[in-house]
Amino acid sequence: MTTSAQSPGPHGVRRVDYTGAGLLESDLLPNPFEQARAWIENAVSAADERADVPEPTAVSVATVDASGAPNVRTVLMRFFDERGPGFVTNLESSKSREIEADPRVALSLTWPALFRSIRFRGRASLIERDEVEAYFDSRPYGSRLSAWASDQSRPSAGRDDLERRWAEVLGRYPDTGSDADVPVPPFWGGWRVSCDEVEFWAGRSNRLHDRLVFTRTGRGDLADASSWEVSRRQP
C-alpha cells in the first residue's frame, strides 16, 4: 500500500490520501476472531518486512476514572484467542484500579501504514493466574525485573529513584539463566476483554472508508459466528 501525501494547506495541515484496499462484506471472514487474527498476523508479518509498523500489537486501552473522565494509554496486547484480547500490567496501576471500579473498556489496534484498525468494546476481567505466570516466565530477564522495580502510575521522585529500585531488584534476583530466577510479583497480572462489539476499519481514498462491525447477539465467544451480527457504518 502507498500513501499520496499532499503539501500542507494554508493552515499548515498535512493531508494524506488513504489508498488502502478497503474491506467489503464479501471479503469478511465468518466471525470476529478469524478476521482479527488475520489482520493481526498480517501486521506482524509486515513488521518483519518494513519499518513503518514497529509495534504491531500495540493497543490503546480506554477506561474511565472515578469521576467518569476518560483515560487512555497504550500497552502491548500479549493475549489473543477466542475469549478476547488481553494485556498484562501492574494490578495496582491506574488502569487496573479503574477497571476494578468499572470493567467496561475499549481497545484499539491501529496500523496507520496499513490503513487498518480494529476496535474492541466490552468488559475486562482478570486473566487466570496460571496463564499470567506462564507468560511472565517467557519475558526477557530485564522485563521481569522491571515488573518489580516500578510502582506503576505512582509519583516518582526522579529518574535516580527508578534506577535505585532497579539496582535493588537486580541484586535481589540475579540472572541465573533460568525462567524462574525472577518470581511473578503478587501485584502483577493481566486483563482480558470479553467483547460485545468488534469494528474493522479499512482506510480508502477520499475518506470513503469501510467500517464493518460485529455486534454481539448471543453468548458465544469471538469464534462463534452465530453469536454475532454484521453491519456497516458510515465513515
Image: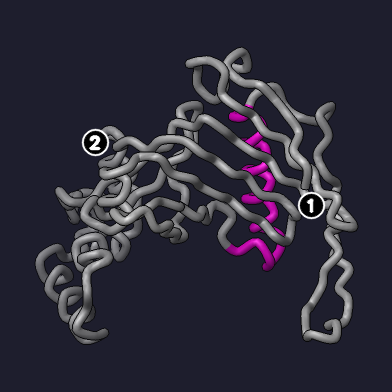
Residue placed most toward the observer, 69 or 108: 69
CA distance separating discs 1 and 2: 39 Å
Residue at 85% of width from left, 86% of height from top? Answer: 10
Q: Secondary structure at mark 2?
A: helix
Residue placed most toward the observer, 81 or 173: 81
Q: Write down the quadrant of residue 71 in the picture.
A: bottom left
Kind of residue at disc 2: Arg
Kind of residue at disc 1: Gly
| 62 with respect to 109 (left or right) | left
Q: Nearer the viewer, mark 1 or mark 2?
A: 1
Residue at 30% of width from left, 50% of height from top? Answer: 98
Circle 1: is it few (<14), some (14-19), or many (20+) Cα within 10 Å? many
Label tally: 2
Q: Secondary structure at mark 1?
A: loop
Q: Which residues are magenta?
A: 32-54
Q: Position of residue 6 (x, y in %)?
A: 88, 76
Q: Position of residue 82 (x, y in %)?
A: 50, 27
Q: Quadrant of the N terminus?
A: bottom right
Asked if residue 47 lies in the magenta stretch, the reply is: yes
Residue linked to disc 2:
129
| 173 with respect to 94 (left or right) | left
Residue placed most toward the observer, 165 or 9: 9
Q: Write down the quadrant of residue 213 in the picture.
A: top right
Main secondary-structure element of the magenta-colored stretch: helix
Residue linked to disc 1:
203
Is 3 placed above or below 64 here? below
Q: Position of residue 39 (x, y in %)?
A: 67, 42
Going from N to C along the chain, the mark reached first, 1 or 2, is: 2
Is 83 placed above or below 48 here? above
Asked if residue 138 lies in the magenta stretch, the reply is: no
